[in-house]
Amino acid sequence: MSMPSQGPAVPRRRLGAELRRLREDVGLTLEQAAVALECSTSKISRLETGKGLPKQRDVRDLARLYGKQAEAELERLLRWAREGAKAGWWQEYTKLLDAEPFMLDGVDRLVALESDASRIKAFAQPCIFGLLQTQAYARSVLANALPQHSVDEIDSLVQLRTRRQEILTEAERPLSLHAVLDEAALRREVGSREIMVEQFQQLLRWGRMPNITLQLLPFSAGFVRASAGPFMVIEFEESVDQDVVYVESQAGNLYLEGDFGVETYVRIFDDVSRRALGPVETEMWLRDRC
């Protein structure tokens, strides 16, 4: 089953950014726009951040409120709203994790952003980066992380993880991935020794692909700024689509946009990459453990 080339994340983000610009151009606050439309400020905010499900009626009402410039752009705004309202292929799976699958939050938002990205820089701990996991490794991780889910539900989430990997092997536009894996993630036995050997062999195969760069951050590198936890810098080909940082934690996942947050994590990733083993040394490390 093939994936569509683009999900709803990009059109929603473009629509949201333009709606915010139009609102600010006419000098309206979120609260004033919400009062005029007789809705909550959170609804306007979710539209502007690309999280909410865009409805054409809401877009028409906002364009009317924002005046002539917005009305002149109405056709483009409505096109983004239509594209942003389409369900992503992943939503049959993420409904197991997200209460509102059409709201681009949590895992749903992450997969939507991955599907539209051109490049991802990832630092992985305490386990191997999700897009690189074998089915057996992923099943063991998910079964332990989500003990309240049934075997069938875990199987569905493993399928989701496997389908997410298709962005790495697309013939026309494969995702460019640069992943730095913490040595602890590779030494920690997940499932069994056999599962780990299979996982190392798969990492070797991933590392031979021209669009994937793998590095190991050894214990000897000492403390690094990334030691606080795993993160991803998600980059987009079009300059109009702002890059996003995804930070994962037990307390809740965080999405950062804006130059300061993104540039901070780009610098952290660059520092980690400089201190990690090179791709050839990483391959040798993996071969020694197969």
Image: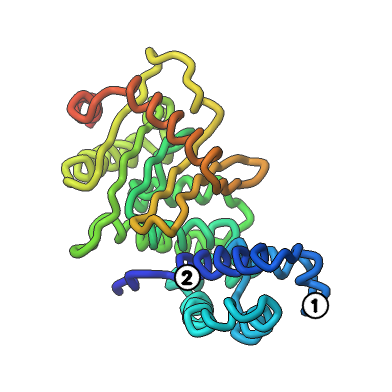
Q: Position of residue 41 (x, y in %)?
A: 77, 66
Above or below for 258 versus 99: above
Residue at which label 1 appears = 36
Image quadrant in which the C terminus is located: top left
Residue drawn at the location 47% of the way across and 70% of the way down: 11
Q: Amino acid at mark 1?
A: Ala
Image quadrant in which the N terminus is located: bottom left
* Type of colouring: rainbow
Residue 140 numbered tag: none
Q: Position of residue 19 (x, y in %)?
A: 60, 69
- Kindly report the distance in space between the C-alpha atoms of the residues bearing marks 1 and 2: 25 Å
Q: Residues within 10 Å of mark 2 (few under 14, many from 20)?
A: many
Q: Position of residue 249 (x, y in %)?
A: 60, 40
Above or below for 273 versus 19: above
Q: Secondary structure at mark 1?
A: helix
From where the camera sits, is residue 97 visible? Answer: no
Residue at which label 2 appears = 11
Above or below for 91 versus 267: below
Q: Amino acid at mark 2?
A: Pro
Residue drawn at the location 58% of the way across and 51% of the way down: 146
